[in-house]
Image (cartoon, rainbow, N blue to C red):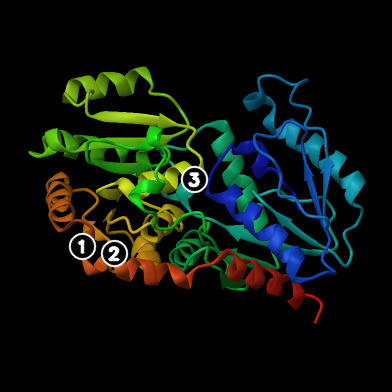
Amino acid sequence: MDGIIFELQSRGGISRIYKEILPRMCDLDDALRITLFGDKRKKQALPEHAHIDPVNIPTFRQFLRPGSLWMPMITKMRDSARQRRLGSGSGQIWHSTYYTLPQNWAGYQVLTIHDMIYEQFAFLFNTRDDHWVRTYKRQCIQNADVIICVSESTKNDLLEYYQVKDKEIRVIYSAYSRVFKPINKDEIIPDLRNQKPFFLYVGRRLHHKNFVQMLRAYSIWPSRDSVDLLIVDRTPWSSGERRLLAELGIGGSVHLQLNVSDLELCQLYNQAEAFIYPSLYEGFGIPLLEAMACSCPVIASRIPSTIEVAGEIPFYFEPNSIDDLCETFNTALSLGKNTPRVQQGLEKVKDYSWEKTALQTLNVYRDFFT
């Protein structure tokens, strides 16, 4: 298995999946052995288990700069170095964490598709590196023996963009950490106690996340003076974002909190008036489960993956309507946490577990040898 995702992400949904399921898969099958190929310069720690063997493969990036210019050459050199360590792969399974292919591989290949963002928003993802991702993704799809999709929505998008009629496709849902749960007010760390009511946004501030649209809706919402907007992300404000906040007149009401741990995030979900998930497109949506598991009302754009994952638990709005989002702010705030949706959300998240995800992925592996 190529652990490249741990070099690309310091935190994120894709790396979270593998970090959660790989040790569980090893616990479920004592015969399973995972060799995790990667670079020494990782952005986060690898999943740990006695049956997971990390192997460092040089990336050559330090010798070929800028990386964006030399990416095709870097990839070929890395693939060659990895191939010398891998061998033919006969009787083994290759499962890349993010669209890499072994050369001259005689074994089986499993591919997980997390979303179709690079295809849906190709006009935004148009750099040399973005083209590299799409190229290798297509090659991985063509070579895969089994393709795992994280939702039926992602499977449908895959079928729309790629010719995969002769491929076996399985849908295996992601899940959420059991850290996320309802807690009492006296369990909240003093430094995380918010005196003023707030809506919560969690994640990157990208175009397809509909972040700017959410800010514009919040700026014209009549009740915004009584409810702050808290953003949890890992990158500071850009100069352009600061200008936008000033132009909208909401700089004093929108707050950014960086590098929040899961335990801290749980406490924020538990305090929030509602969690806002305004995305134009998602492959799955782990934060939806986290919020529902914390008894936090959810405001969400009406997109296929969110409907699939969360059902009718969220307060939905049309993703391109600012007025609709403002009205949903009012609805969520007026109903609060007393709505039956909150209890229904606690029941809904019981359908998802990393143990289930791990077992279903392990069964994909097992099927090659039965």
User: Which secondary structure lies at badge 1?
Assistant: helix
Q: Is residue 34 visible?
A: yes
At label 1, which amino acid type do we have?
Answer: Asn
Horizontal and vertical percent position of residue 302: 27, 59
Q: Is residue 15 left or right of residue 236?
A: right
Determine the secondary structure under disc 3. Answer: helix
User: Callout 1 environment at 10 Å: few (<14), some (14 to 19), or many (20+)?
Assistant: few
Residue 277 visible to an observer of this rendering = no
Q: Nearer the viewer, mark 2 or mark 1?
A: 1
Count of numbered circles in the view? 3
Residue 251 rendering spot, x and y as whole percentages: 23, 23
Q: Earlier in the sequence, mark 3 or mark 1?
A: 3
What residue is at 17 percent from the left and 39 percent from the top?
217
Q: Identify the amino acid type marked 3.
A: Leu
Q: Residue 80 location in percent, x, y? A: 85, 40
2 and 1 marks in contact (CB < 8 Å):
yes
| Above or below: residue 192 compared with residue 287 | above
Above-or-below relation of 49 to 128: below
* Residue denoted by label 2: 342
What secondary structure is found at the residue carrying circle 2? helix
Q: In the rendered structure, are the residues bearing label 3 and label 1 in contact, judged by CB atoms less than 8 Å apart?
A: no
Specify the amino acid type for callout 2.
Answer: Val
Tell me how far mark 3 sits from mark 1, CA to CA: 24 Å
Question: Observer-nearest residue: 345 or 8?
Answer: 345
The residue lying toward the viewer, choosing from 200 and 18, is: 200
The circle on residue 338 is 1
At 80% from the left and 37% from the top, the residue drawn is 78
Residue highlighted by disc 3:
263
In the rendered image, the residue lying farthest to the front is 186
Which residue is rendered at x = 39% and y = 57% of the image? Answer: 182
Measured Cα–Cα span from mark 3 to mark 2: 20 Å
Where is residue 265? Give x, y as percent.
43, 44
